């Protein structure tokens, strides 16, 4: 249940108009008409004092479908079922139509939800990349990972994945250059050294660690 006061703040901020409650009732009425299906007696938007509730069945919202698919893919990745995990993560990302929620006004609730959505999508992309790397698809990942690290320069997991993909393509020098560039960015932007996983990847590349070689599951 979302209280009326919270909805008013979400729509109009800290300085709402005098007839904000009446305006909110108009908006709710319009949403009810929009969401009501033919033959349906009740709208999924319900009045529950002191506010409103949106009641929907399972998988009626695409982000619920996304969450379910990501959970399934994470389990498959953990169980080393990389083909299935790849297909599941791809299905989850197919639900996206970027940019999300950019065509609506943002209050504090929606702002937080949009941040969560972007983070959830990036985590899905990272897990999909891990599963593709385990399937030996490193060559097709390089260009995408270069773009992703440019868009998200502080995302260390993406740099680590790019380094591994380059190394497996025989581009050892390029992989080490990615590390140096990431380290420089982290130092300049945050005053931090790379995380342990990124440092371990650099050391493994410098020593040509056998664990970096691809071992495709049977």
Image (cartoon, rainbow, N blue to C red):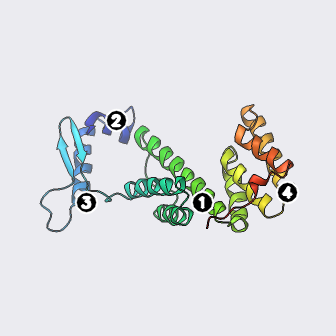
Residue for badge 2 = 16
Spatial separation of the CA atoms under disc 3 and disc 2? 26 Å
Relative to 194, residue 139 above or below: below
Q: Quadrant of residue 25?
A: top left
- Label 4 neighbour load within 10 Å: few <14, some 14-19, many 20+: some
Q: Please tell me which residue lies in front, 146 or 54.
A: 146
- Looking at the rendered image, the disc whose residue lies closer to the viewer, 3 or 2, is 3
Spatial separation of the CA atoms under disc 1 and disc 2? 49 Å
Q: Please tell me which residue lies in front, 35 or 76.
A: 76
- Looking at the rendered image, the disc whose residue lies closer to the viewer, 3 or 4, is 4
Q: Secondary structure at mark 1?
A: helix
Are circles 1 and 3 on residues that touch, CB within 8 Å? no
Are circles 1 and 4 on residues that touch, CB within 8 Å? no
- Looking at the rendered image, the disc whose residue lies closer to the viewer, 2 or 4, is 4
Q: Secondary structure at mark 4?
A: helix
Res 34 seen here:
yes
Are circles 1 and 2 on residues that touch, CB within 8 Å? no
Are circles 3 and 2 on residues that touch, CB within 8 Å? no
Question: Considering the image in quadrants, where does the C terminus appear?
Answer: bottom right
Q: Which residue lies at the image location 39% right of the left edge and 36% below the top edge?
A: 13
Spatial separation of the CA atoms under disc 2 and disc 4? 59 Å
- Most distant residue in the left direction: 41
Q: Earlier in the sequence, mark 2 or mark 4?
A: 2
> In the rendered view, does 210 fall on the left or right side of 35?
right
Residue for badge 1 = 131
Q: Earlier in the sequence, mark 1 or mark 2?
A: 2
Residue for badge 3 = 35
Spatial separation of the CA atoms under disc 3 and disc 4? 55 Å
Residue for badge 4 = 172
Q: Which residue lies at the image location 50% right of the left edge and 57% below the top edge?
A: 76
Kindly identify which numbered label has been placed on residue 190: none
Q: Earlier in the sequence, mark 1 or mark 4?
A: 1
């Amino acid at each position: 249940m979302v209280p009326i006061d919270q909805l008013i703040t979400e729509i109009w901020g800290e300085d709402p108009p005098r007839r904000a409650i009446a305006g909110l009732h108009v908006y709710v009425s319009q949403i009810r008409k929009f969401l009501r299906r033919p033959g349906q007696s009740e709208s999924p938007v319900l009045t529950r004092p002191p506010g409103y509730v949106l009641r929907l069945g399972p998988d009626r919202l695409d982000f619920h479908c996304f969450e379910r698919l990501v959970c399934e893919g994470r389990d498959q990745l953990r169980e080393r079922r990389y083909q299935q995990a790849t297909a599941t993560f791809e299905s989850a990302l197919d639900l996206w139509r970027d940019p999300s929620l950019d065509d609506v006004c943002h209050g504090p609730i929606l702002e937080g939800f949009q941040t969560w959505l972007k983070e959830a999508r990036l985590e899905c992309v990272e897990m999909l990349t891990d599963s593709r790397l385990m399937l030996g698809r490193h060559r097709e990942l390089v260009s995408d990972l270069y773009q992703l690290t440019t868009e998200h320069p502080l995302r260390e997991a993406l740099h680590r994945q790019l380094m591994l993909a380059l190394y497996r393509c025989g581009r050892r020098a390029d992989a080490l250059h990615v590390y140096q560039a990431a380290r420089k960015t982290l130092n300049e932007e945050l005053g931090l050294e790379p995380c342990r996983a990124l440092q371990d990847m650099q050391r493994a590349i410098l020593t040509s660690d056998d664990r970096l070689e691809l071992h495709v599951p049977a």
